Image: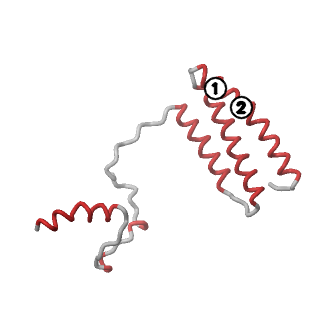
Amino acid sequence: MKRILALAPAILLLAACGAETPKDEAAAVDHSTMDHSGHDMGGEAKAELTEAQAAYKAVNDRMHAGMADIPADADVAFMQGMLAHHKGAVEMSEVALKYAKDEKARDLATRVIAAQKAEIAEMEAWLKARSAP
């Protein structure tokens, strides 16, 4: 019994890391197809986002959506991905200028907008010259 208790932490650690443990295959359940939308999964309720948080989240979502489609051409993929990333940086900086109070943060946001807009123009010209979207 002492040996089993001594091994329990190791068994739990392996299970948590995804190590396979022998089990009855008939008892296996695929939870990925189950609807858990009406269940409280034990986490704390999330507070409503502030106006600034919602604005940053919207920018982040748009930026990542723009970076999700990756073309096979590595050069075009780089330019398109960086273009979406830079546009996101400009939008995030604009949100900062609307909500941020710290003068250094506001100054950096202003400089980011100027620098990123210049690089956006360069990337758009590169893509246009190659008839890439």
Callout 2: 10 Å neighbours few (<14), some, many (20+)?
some
Task: Classify residue 88 as left or right of residue 53.
Answer: right
What kind of element bears circle 1?
Answer: helix
For the residues labelled 1 and 2, the Cα–Cα distance comes to 10 Å
Height in image: 41 above or below 47?
below
Residue lying at 86% horizontally and 56% vertically, measured from the top left: 131
Which residue is outermost to the right?
A: 129
Residue on which the image places disc 1: 97
Residue lying at 69% horizontally and 35% vertically, measured from the top left: 90
Residue on which the image places disc 2: 113
Residue lying at 60% horizontally and 19% vertically, measured from the top left: 103
Quadrant for the C terminus, please: bottom right
Q: In the rendered structure, are the residues bearing label 1 and label 2 in contact, judged by CB atoms less than 8 Å apart?
A: yes
User: Which amino acid type corresponds to the residue marked 2 in the rendered image?
Assistant: Ile
At which x and y percent is residue 100?
57, 25
What kind of element bears circle 2?
Answer: helix
Height in image: 82 above or below 114?
below
Along the line of sight, which residue is nearer the eye, 130 or 26?
A: 130
Dividing the picture into quarters, in which one does residue 4 lie?
bottom left
User: Which amino acid type corresponds to the residue marked 1 in the rendered image?
Assistant: Leu
At which x and y percent is residue 17?
36, 62
Residue lying at 78% horizontally and 39% vertically, measured from the top left: 119
